[in-house]
Amino acid sequence: MKLRYFAWVRERIGTAEETVEPPESVATVGDLLFWLQGRGETYAFALAEPDAIRVALDQDHAERDAPIAGVREVALFPPMTGG
Amino acid sequence: MATLRTLITADPIDTAGEIAAIQAGRSDIGAVVSFTGLCRDEDGRLDALELEHYPGMAEKEIGRIAAQAAERWEVGALTVIHRHGRIRPGETIVVVVAASVHRHAAFEAAEFVMDFLKTHAPFWKKEHARDGSPTGWVAAKASDDQARDRWGD
């Protein structure tokens, strides 16, 4: 699946997007965040406060318990500040 | 059926033109309410705001919020335009124009759109200071969440 990062999540991880293949045990948004945290220092830093991370699955807002099977694009970003 | 116009753009927004356009050629509109969100200079400290957005999802979310507002209130037309990219103090970031037969629907629809846009549309503001000091991301406000929550689910 494709991962996209925005704002300070993008800056802290150090890339705007990447393609990953999480193991099958990673079933939900919450599982994915936990798995990503273990991928290295920049991920641990970017995702240190999980409550500050919002997630979209195929461009729709999603909660932590949402399943990620079949999802093509997952976006991680901070709370929005438009308007 | 309400006429919906939503746009995400890097170009300056013509607020007066949008207000004029929403009622052009129509005689069923009795009220037009507009909201304009501007870039402040933060007491002279700010050089510019950089508006990052999630292309695709930003359009989708704003379209969805406008459609929800048009479903909830009897608006004849609703326009929502949001800029991205570099924005200088005094320039317009967002414009919402709502048109209806009577004023309450237009007032409330415009306010609903802004409250949901703040918390649901994927845009992020970064500040660039005039003195060149390090830039910073604007933090989300709890008051924006509260403003959204008062509309219920």
Image (cartoon, coloured by chain):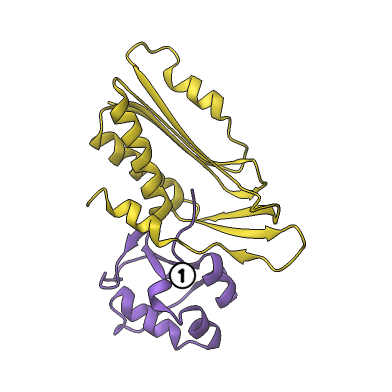
The residue located at (57%, 76%) in the rendering is A12
Say which quarter of the image contains residue A22.
bottom left
Front position in the image: B98 or A39:
B98
Residue A59 visible from this viewpoint: no
Q: Amino acid at mark 1?
A: Leu
The residue located at (76%, 63%) in the rendering is B132
Position of B45 relative to B21 (above/below): below
Residue B25, given in percent of the width and then of the height, sits at 42, 12
Left or right: B57 as drawn, with respect to B37: left
The residue located at (51%, 26%) in the rendering is B18
Rendered hue of chain A is: purple
Chain ID for yellow:
B
The residue located at (40%, 44%) in the rendering is B114
Front position in the image: B65 or A66:
B65
Residue B100, given in percent of the width and then of the height, sits at 32, 23
Left or right: A22 as drawn, with respect to A69: right
Q: Which residue is mark 1?
A: A3
Residue B27, given in percent of the width and then of the height, sits at 36, 10
